Amino acid sequence: MTVTAEPTTRSGAPPAPPPTAGTTGRPARWSARWSARWRLVVCLTIVVGALGWVAVRGLTGSFVYYLTPTDISVGHKADVDQRVRLGGYVVRGSLHREPSALRFVVSDGVNTMRVLSTGPVPEMFRAGQGVVLEGALGRDGRFHSDTLLVKHDGDYRAPEPGHRPEGG
């Protein structure tokens, strides 16, 4: 008769079986570590994805696109009553001020479009000036604008010595 001894610890008690996670046979500690890592990866992926989406949406919203008279009249890139921006130059001699509106013609050098603007008029507005208008194409073929923005070349010219700038 053979007697086999069971392994014991220093205290004399048999060692505890290793912890397992279900039927995989892996220690529960290992499984918990991977579970925490996966949660972290998923959270980081969501955060990075959300930041990317916000950045892309923010950038596309900040670009100022506008259509030209050719885009609208020939390219048909705007439908009637669709809000768009129209850019071009005010044709000299086409400016007609009315009590509640301003009528003029905008050109891109190729085609022209009649405009009826009911919004405020900037002080720098004049014939030959570059403008960007916000509004919609009307059924009458005229562009109905409620916002008129003046474009300028951005060149700063210092006043000549001894001259005061206008408005100063």
Image (cartoon, rainbow, N blue to C red):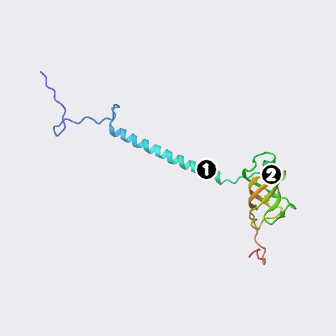
Q: Earlier in the sequence, mark 2 or mark 1?
A: 1
Residue 71, x across and y down, in percent? 78, 48
Check the picture and name the quadrant holding the C terminus: bottom right
Residue 110 locus on image (x, y percent)? 84, 50
* Residue 36 found in image quarter: top left
Residue linked to disc 2: 69
**Looking at this view, is 168 or 107 the one in front?**
107
Q: Nearer the viewer, residue 57 or 17?
A: 57
Please, what secondary structure does the residue beneath circle 1 have? helix
Q: Quadrant of residue 30?
A: top left
Vertical comparison of 129 with 28: above or below: below
How many neighbours does mark 1 have within 10 angstroms: few (below 14), some (14-19), or many (20 or more)? few
Q: In which quadrant of the rendered image does the N terminus lie?
A: top left
Residue at figure coordinates x 81%, y 46% from the top left: 74
Q: Which mark is residue 57?
A: 1
Q: Which mark is residue 70?
A: none
Direction from residue 20 to residue 15 in the image, left or right: left
Q: Amino acid at mark 2?
A: Pro
**Secondary element at tag 2:** helix
Answer few, some or many: residues within 10 Å of disc 2's Cα (few below 14, many 20 plus, some between 14 and 19).
many
Name the spot of residue 166 as percent of width and height, x first: 77, 74
Task: Give me the residue at 56% from left, 48% from top.
Answer: 52
Q: CA distance from mark 2 to mark 1?
A: 28 Å
Q: Amino acid at mark 1?
A: Arg
What residue is at 75 percent from the left and 51 percent from the top? 67
Is 22 situated left or right of 140 in this image?
left
**Cβ atoms at labels 2 and 1 below 8 Å apart:** no
